[in-house]
Every structure is written in C-alpha cells, then in structure tokens.
Amino acid sequence: MLNTITHGTGPRVVIAHGLFGSGRNWGVIAKRLAGSFEVVTPDMRNHGSSPNYPSHSYEDLAGDLAELGPAHFVGHSMGGKAVMALALTRPDLVESLAVLDIAPTSYSHSQMGPLEAMRRADLSGITRRSEVTLEGIDAPTSAFLLQSLDVEARRWMLNLDVLASEMPKILSFPDLGGRYEGPALFLRGGASDYVQAEHEDRIRALFPAARIETVEGAGHWLHADKPREVEAALRTFLAG
C-alpha cells in the first residue's frame, strides 16, 4: 500500500507525482483544493515513504493507484502516465482524468544524468541538504532532487537501483488496448516540449473526450512554475 498524505473532505482527488518526486511536492496545490475535495497525494512505489519493489512498470503503478480509487485522478509526468494506464485498464475506478505535461508515448530523452548524480553524491557526515553537491545538475533541478534526501539517515528516499534498471519502461508507454471515454484534461506547459502537436491524435485516440490546454510561460514542472494557474485549471475541470 502506498504511503499517502490526505487533505480536506469531499469528492476524492488523487494526485500522482513524477519521477524522483514525492507526494509532498503537491502539498501547496493539495491544500488549496482541500476546501472542496479530499485530496490524496501518494508517494509512488520506489519513492518517498512508499515500499520499494523490484519492478517499476506502468502496469505496476496503475495497480498501486487502483487501491486508492474510485477517484478523480491527476498525474504529472511519470504520474501522468500511471494515471493514464489506470484509466485504460480500470476505467471504472477513474471518475475523471487530468494529465500534466506528458503524452501516452515513448520519449528519447534520458533521466540517467540526475540519477547518477544522486548515486555519486557524498552523503557522509552531512547535516543539511545544502551541503550536498549534485555534480552537473542545475540549481533548480538540484533543489527538487534534494527534497528526496533524508538528511538524518543520510540516504535517498528513492530506490535508485530499480529506477535505473527500469528506466526504459519509465520512458516508454505500454500498449494497453482500450480507450477511456470519461472526462479528460491534458494540461501542458507552454515552454515545455513534452506534449507536442504530433501527440494530439494519439491522445484523442485513447481519450476521445480529452481537452488539451496550455499554461503559458510554464515548463515541464508547470505546477511549480505556475501553481495558481494549474490550481485554477484543475479546480474548473474537477468542478465540471
């Protein structure tokens, strides 16, 4: 069972975070939505305080999320692929679907750079996150990755070995068959290249009711770049 944080009461909304993240990343938006919804932010498997497993496929992640439904499901990046997989395999559990800055396709970019930087980091004797240097990683990405560092235990709250071995699965998207006919919102960052015009036909083939909207000025981490705009878009969609 996934470790979860819950805010508020009302219709259940589950927000699945992206690679190298945790449920805490969504705390600000979860608290803002909590006046109208019960917002559940899980740590995905091999992340945060959730259990470690030897596999990390989207079928695995969808199975984990199924235990939190039925609900409205929101997912960013890796979490977006996980909630899409759930909607395609268990549509009875998905009251609506919001996918943030990811498409149901394979990507060629690698996430091994940040992973290897975390592996190389010297954690001996540290007393605060600011003492850790992630070689070759820019400051904003380092700040994000360091949120998953348990300083007291001097360890990463990420199953780095499994995430490395399963990276090809994480970057791909399985052929699951089926379609999700329910309400769907695809929210992309205007400054991100993750959801392009060439992806729209595939999105609508699997999610025929999908609306595709853009948050101008936001990159891939659109909920960090433009939290109020993302919150407003989600609130309007969920209320509908």
Image: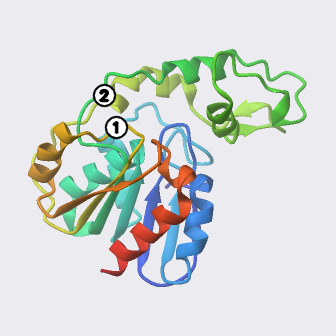
Number of numbered callouts drawn? 2
Relative vertical location of residue 233 with respect to residue 48 in this rendering, above or below: below
Which corner quadrant of the image does residue 170 belong to? Answer: top left
Q: Which of marks 2 and 1 is in front?
A: 1
Where residue 22 appears, as percent x and y from the top left, is 58, 48
How would you rate the neighbour count of disc 2 (Cα within 10 Å): few for under 14, some for 14-19, many for 20 or more? some
Where residue 68 appears, as percent x and y from the top left, is 41, 65
Residue that badge 1 annotates? 194
Q: Dots 2 and 1: beta carbons under 8 Å?
A: yes
For the C terminus, the image quarter is: bottom left
Residue that badge 2 annotates? 107
Residue at 42% x, 52% y is: 216
Which corner quadrant of the image does residue 35 belong to? Answer: bottom right
> In terms of secondary structure, where does tag 1 sit?
loop
Q: What is the spatial separation of the Cα atoms under label 2 and label 1, in whole angstroms?
A: 8 Å
Please give left or right for residue 221 compared with residue 208 in the image.
Answer: right
**Front position in the image: 230 or 152:** 230
How would you rate the neighbour count of disc 1 (Cα within 10 Å): few for under 14, some for 14-19, many for 20 or more? some
**Front position in the image: 35 or 126:** 35
